[in-house]
Amino acid sequence: MGTRIATAAVLIAVVLLWLFVADYPIFAIGALAAYALAAHEMAPLLGFKTRFPFLIAAAIAASAAFFFAPPGLFVLDQIPLWVHILMVAALVFWCAMIPLIKVFPQYSGFWTRPGINFAFGLMLLVPFLLALLILRSHHFAADCNSGALLLLAVMILVWAADTGAYFTGRAVGKNKLIPAVSPNKTREGLYGGLVLALLALALFDYLGWYGDYSAQKLALTLAGIGAILFSVAGDLVESMLKRHAGIKDSGRIFPGHGGMLDRIDSQLAALPCFLGLHFILERALA
């Protein structure tokens, strides 16, 4: 327990430095490092015998994304339309994951198909990488901390949901959520996590951390709720992959906390789904 707490304290400090002290190019390098580590850990979960092919695919995908949408454009608040479309596609992808989680392990034969696994892994990682850069760059030229607060506010929604789910589940949890994938998650925990995360959403909106994303309150609220709920799907998808591969932890880079994927699994879904939902709702409600 002591190791786990110490590691968590160090991780929090590093994340805060990464968000508020590192300049945008250094932040982008850190985002790429997290992306690369996640790809390295994901390859065995996808059934690849060696990590090299998927790492090459992930590197090519990131390079292509940066070629067609240089991160410098994000700093100027210029987000290409195809990036918005990718975030909407990620939202559709995560919606499709929900029935897949529910039927696991009955229909898991497609995990043996390398082509599907390449596409699946890249859809987990690439939208997340771009979402990190987009949120962090929000109004960067006018206020270098604006995007840091925005990204932190969305990330904390996930952490609040995890915390609320843990304590609510331990206190009153009785009905299992998806026992075949994650035996410890309960429906009561899901509701408790949602309540705490919504309180966090209201607080950060009041503090102005969402910037322009709060111009449409309904769009922000629904996008926030979507990010919270899909963060649970992100956690469950990683659990599903680990169970299918027979792996307990994605890695051992963080003592007491497992690997990079174990730390960002919920964020993989939450960040792009937040952007995808907000993009759709902002235009629908305009």
Image (cartoon, rainbow, N blue to C red):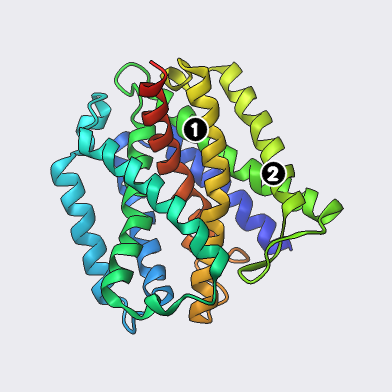
The image's mark for residue 90 is none
Name above or below for residue 159 compared with residue 5: above
Residue 194, given in percent of the width and then of the height, sits at 67, 40
* Residue labelled with disc 1: 223
Residue 22, given in percent of the width and then of the height, sits at 38, 37
Q: Is residue 233 visible?
A: yes
Q: Residue at x 57, y 21 (%)?
A: 205
Mark 1: give few (<14), some (14-19) or many (20+) Cα within 10 Å. many
Q: Residue at x 40, y 69 (%)?
A: 42
Mark 2: give few (<14), some (14-19) or many (20+) Cα within 10 Å. many
Q: Residue at x 29, y 68 (%)?
A: 118
The N terminus lies in quadrant:
bottom right
**Residue 86 falls in which quadrant of the image?**
top left
In-image side of 133 versus 235 (left or right): left
Q: Nearer the viewer, residue 205 or 89?
A: 89
Residue 106, given in percent of the width and then of the height, sits at 53, 77
Query: Does label 2 or label 1 sit earlier along the sequence?
Result: 2
Residue 130, given in percent of the width and then of the height, sits at 31, 43
Q: Nearer the viewer, residue 12 or 35?
A: 35
Q: Is residue 251 visible?
A: no
The image's mark for residue 193 is 2
In-image side of 30 versus 235 (left or right): left
Q: Nearer the viewer, residue 247 or 185?
A: 185
* Tags 2 and 1 touching, CB below 8 Å: no
Amino acid type of the residue tagged 2 in the rendering: Gly
- Secondary structure at badge 1 equals helix
